[in-house]
Image (cartoon, helix red, strand yellow):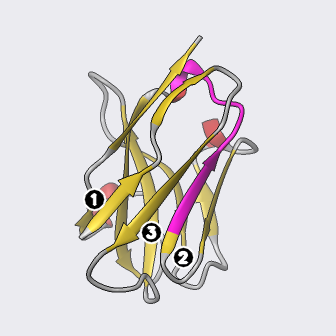
Amino acid sequence: QLQASGGGLVQAGGSLRLSCTDSRRTFSNNAVGWFRQAPGKEREFVAGISWRGSTTRYTDSVKGRFTIFRDNAKVYLQMNSLKSGDTAVYYCAARPYGCRLNRNEYTDWGQGTQVTVSS
């Protein structure tokens, strides 16, 4: 089961690092995506990384500020220069091999972690 952690309250311009772990298996054959959902909005793709880590994708609004990376046990989302618009519940999700932008293509989801950016 996936579990996201690392959220919290931070001032605008600050940084947070989110982590995603899988209690049942390693991520070795799975792409992992980070999604977020703000109140009243749909869940949107933020960043994704392929199973080998060779391919990463980002939504335009976080490019240059967020970095996704992985090791054998965890997938991380380093978030720098946070803005109030980044406030949301962040979820990690997994699917076999390649990362996709469409949340419907992810098979396993973790509980979210709240990120709140104060202006």
Question: Is there a contact, CB below 8 Å, between mark 2 and mark 1?
Answer: no
Label placed on residue 46: none
Quick check: 79 above or below 71? above
Height in image: 2 above or below 115?
below
Instruction: From the top left corner, tell me how far across and down residue 46 is, in percent.
Output: 50, 48
Numbered disc 3: secondary structure? strand
Which residue is pictured at 32% across the width and 86% down the height?
25
Q: Specify the label residue 110 is tagged with.
A: 1
* Chain part drawn in magenta: 75-85
| Number of the front mark, 3 or 1 | 1
Which residue occupies the extreme right position in the image? 64
Give x and y (percent) for residue 30. 42, 81
Percent across and percent down for residue 56 are: 63, 66
Tag 3 residue: 32
Count how many numbered circles sit on residues in the image: 3
The answer for how far apart the CA atoms under marks 3 and 1 are is 11 Å
Badge 2: residue crowd in 10 Å (few <14, some 14–19, many ≥20): many
Question: Could you tell me which secondary element the residue under label 2 belongs to?
Answer: loop
Question: Is 43 within the magenta?
Answer: no
Q: Position of residue 38 (x, y in %)?
A: 35, 28
- Name the residue type under label 3: Val
Give the residue number, with chain letter if any, for mark 2.
Answer: 50
- Figure quadrant of the C terminus: top right
